[in-house]
Amino acid sequence: MKKLKYSFFGIIILLLLSFVYFVTYTFAEPKAYDFMTKYVLTEKLPFDRNKNVYGHDDIVLVVVDDKTVEKYRWPWKRENWCKIFDYFSEYTQPKAIIYDFLVAAPDIDNPESDKKFFDSIKKSKNLINSFSFDIEHWNDYEAEKEYNQIFTKKYAVDVESNLKLANAYTSFRPLFSDLIKVVENVGFVDILPGFIDNFFNLYTHDEIYRNHSYFIMHNGAFFPSTAMKSFLISNKNPHVIVNKDYIEFPTLDYKIKQITKEYLMYTPLKFYKLNDDGFSHKKFSVTDIITSYEEIKNNKKPKINPETFKNKVILIGGNVTAAPGLNDNKNTPVSILHPGVDIQATAVDNLVHNDFLTVLPKWFNTLVTILGMLFVFYTIKSHRLFKAVTYSIFVMFLYFMASIACFYNCVIINVITPVVMFVITMIIGYIYNYFIENRNKEKVESAMGKYMSEDVMKNVLKNIDNLGLGGKKATVTVLFSDIRGFTALSEKMTAPQVSELLNEYFSEMEPIVSKYNGIINKFIGDAVMAVFGEPIQDENHAKNAVKCGFEMLKKVEELDKKWLNEGKPSIQIGVGVNTGEVFVGNIGSEKRMEYTVIGDTVNLASRLESYNKTYKTKILISSSTYDASKDIVEVNKISDVEIRGKSEKMDIYEIINVL
């Protein structure tokens, strides 16, 4: 039963720890991750391996901003984009241009404007148009099916893979047919909020964007994000292998770690520190690009030199909160109003520079957590409160500092979950200690009860912090009992037989002493010394001592009959009782003390017991004990007895009966 009880409590604790781990990891860990990303991770400048300098400048943004909206009426005719596309295609040599706007329907009021827009796109060979998936089916199923086939055939990327993922989306949001005819490159702009749970393999949706999918598998085909498409174009469409854990480019000797879920593949984004304008990458206004284009056409020096964009990836997007279609802000770990185009630029930046986060495997986080918990538990078990708490807090602080160092070096480790588990371990450890100490206390009390009176033991435990030598004077009654002729008797018996006899005798005497509020102060060989009145306060201690002594005699008579039947020797005892003042308390040294009573009262009780041999009696009491108990006893008076150590004779009394 004890094993079952411990197993039950072990299972309960394990379930509790698992629950706390799950709750903390699910709800607190994402917040800790965001904190570390914003205040630690982004403090370290990215390193450009190609240029051997800190900071990336080969990804730039061209943004429809407040300045653009003030100068040009929005929404504008699509032909206005022509100047921007033509500027980049005619005068700059960018690696890729990402157009981060969805063109879902024709401009019915300005068909000529659309035509110019399409012609300009057609000339821009490295322009990447954005598209998006849809979570709902079209109303026209046949039209949807035909569109999906056309779109997949033209834009799906040739990827080597053995993955079989469920569809994350039901369909595509349609680009109208005239646009599909001229657009050669597309990439999706869908990004999902949430936290990748690297332990429980869950995805927590909390409206914070932390990750990027470089590929989405739909109906068995692979479609790239705009970031991935720009990378493929920049590297002349290298061979791609996609498996559960990596996106690999064998010809480039390059691979990307990813996390694969039931239907999606994710890579944690490494965010960069935001500038004062709210962007992490260099930003140009669309207005300045249009102005520069017009200045070149008029043979003037352009406001922005086209060389600025040479060999760069350009992302064109919007960032005007009040304008429809331009408010693309999202909540990320580094900003609650992070421009969507800058998030896309971050995905490009990570990909181009192989600047990814290293996510430590779940087994490592689990191992570190368990080792830390074991250390905390061992510390609590092995040290006193102050040291244990100090060491445990130090371990937590050390772990937190280590997690800061990890994030600073782009290594993702669990931050808050291990610390919470350390704290829970402390709590469980002290609860465990509490129960163990209580159990040990019970064992100590049980063990001490075998060596001293239960009441003495309680008094010791009650004053455990103030134990010391000393005591007080008190009036008590002392009882001595002794087995007659025990020395001669023991010579005829073996040691085990003597031990068995004494143990049975003392086992019968102890309950009688306790019954009358007495304590057995000590066993002296075959003798018993009992005290009444201390530490158990009892006004009738003299009467109770007399009753106790008389009942002890009766019990010995019963034992004697029993032992005779068992072939054991017969015994007789003598009892002496005296009432008077004694010193009661702790006697001895600071290292070894004993709770006892001392004084002439004790000596007289011992002598009275020995006088039973002289007067052929069984129980003798002093005059002081008789005066306190004469209403309950029948006695024979023995007058004028010379007591050794006393200058005057005194009367003593033999107990005949107790009423």
Image: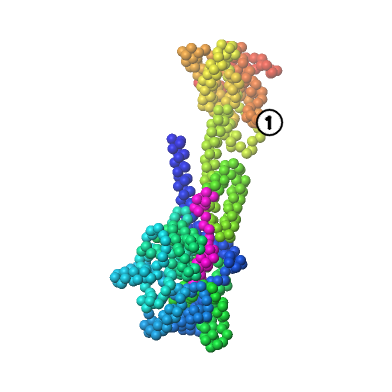
Q: How is the image coloured?
A: rainbow
Question: Image check: 22 left or right of 399?
Answer: left
Q: Is residue 344 magenta?
A: yes
Q: Is residue 208 visible?
A: no
Residue range in magenta is 341-368
Q: Is residue 27 magenta?
A: no
Closer to the camera, 134 or 334? 134
Looking at the image, residue 297 lies above or below residue 576 = below
- The secondary structure type at the circle numbered 1 is loop
In the figure, residue 409 lies in which quadrant?
A: bottom right
For label 1, the crowd category at 10 Å Cα-Cα, with few meaning under 14, some 14 to 19 and many 20 or more, is few
In the figure, residue 189 lies in which quadrant?
A: bottom left
Q: Residue furthest bottom?
A: 298
Question: Image check: 9 left or right of 56?
Answer: left
Q: Quadrant of the N terminus?
A: top left
In the figure, residue 628 lies in which quadrant?
A: top right
Q: Residue furthest front?
A: 251
The type of residue carrying mark 1 is Ser
Residue assigned mark 1:
589
Q: Identify the residue at image location x=46%, y=35%.
A: 2
Q: Identify the residue at image location x=52%, y=65%.
A: 350
Looking at the image, residue 42 lies above or below residue 317 = above
Closer to the camera, 378 or 522? 378
| Residue 263 percent coordinates (x, y) | 40, 60
Q: Identify the residue at image location x=51%, y=73%.
A: 95
| Residue 293 percent coordinates (x, y) | 52, 83
The dominant secondary structure in magenta is helix
Q: Identify the residue at image location x=48%, y=12%.
A: 567
| Residue 525 percent coordinates (x, y) | 60, 19
Question: Image check: 310 left or right of 581?
Answer: left
Looking at the image, residue 234 lies above or below residue 522 = below
Closer to the camera, 98 or 197? 98
